[in-house]
Image (tube, rainbow, N blue to C red):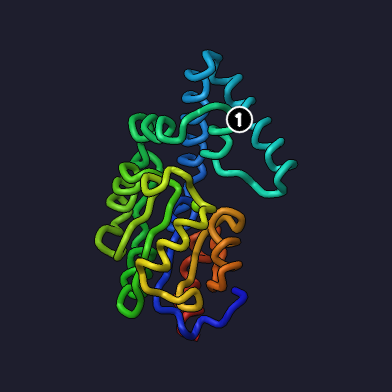
Amino acid sequence: MRKPLNDIRGIVFDLDGTLYVSPSFATAIQDAAADCIARIKSIEPGEAGRLLADTRKRMIEERDEIPTLSAVCSELGGNVRDLHTYFASCLQPEDHLARDPRVITLLENLSKSRALYLFTNNNTALTNRIIGYLGLNGLFRRIYTINDSWKGKPDEDMLDRILAESGLLPSQALFVGDRYDVDLRLPEQRGCPVYLSQSIEQLLRLEELLKA
Ligand SMILES: [Mg+2]
């Protein structure tokens, strides 16, 4: 937390890895991406998985930041829309997630005094299933997914759009996410307060931090 939190009017949450943490679902997403690349390139899924890992490593070295899965798949010739159509058809978040009443209570409490937004690189179909399963329906004033731009965070245009549509000044919009490069770097550069949360325990601390 690098900026004062006394004027926060809105909170923009990332979804995956932030409002829930599930290593097995994260693995299922990576496996599905490898399957998708395997189909595009007519190679075995195992080879596609290694190709994804090698490409990610090369992109990290070249760009000095961790690329999103969409960016890695695009680099390999995949189309982001096709990738997400495939994800929506084969991924079963319900098999991996568990509803956490503490997270529901946290968001219910925060929503009483602040507007909550969701901004995720996941697609609309899976996002709706995930937030429904987690019991978070109706808590967000607006949900932004990769379907809005097909670019994925970090995306300056989407950041501008969220700030404009929410009517929040940068200093009033707290961004919460589990990946600094993806979720937080750009908002922080714009002047938004940011909070890195990589576990539910860290997420739950938000309520105390905002009270202080
Ligand atoms: Mg995330």
Residue to which mark 1 is pinned: 52
Q: Is mark 1 within 8 Å of ligand 1?
A: no
Q: Position of residue 154 (x, y in %)?
A: 54, 53
Q: Position of residue 38 (x, y in %)?
A: 52, 20
Q: Is residue 193 above or below residue 20?
A: below
Name which residue lies at 45% across and 56% down: 158
The crowding category of the residue bearing disc 1, from other C-alpha atoms within 10 Å (few below 14, some 14 to 19, many at least 20), is many
Q: Is residue 37 above or below residue 66?
A: above
The residue lying toward the viewer, choosing from 129 and 9, is 9
Q: Position of residue 29 (x, y in %)?
A: 47, 36
Q: Is residue 25 above or below residue 170?
A: above
Amino acid under disc 1: Leu
Total number of numbered discs in the rendering: 1
Name which residue lies at 33% across and 57% down: 143
On screen, residue 90 versus residue 209, left or right, reads left
Q: Secondary structure at mark 1?
A: helix
Name which residue lies at 57% across and 61% down: 186
Q: Quadrant of residue 74?
A: top right
Name which residue lies at 45% across and 76% down: 169
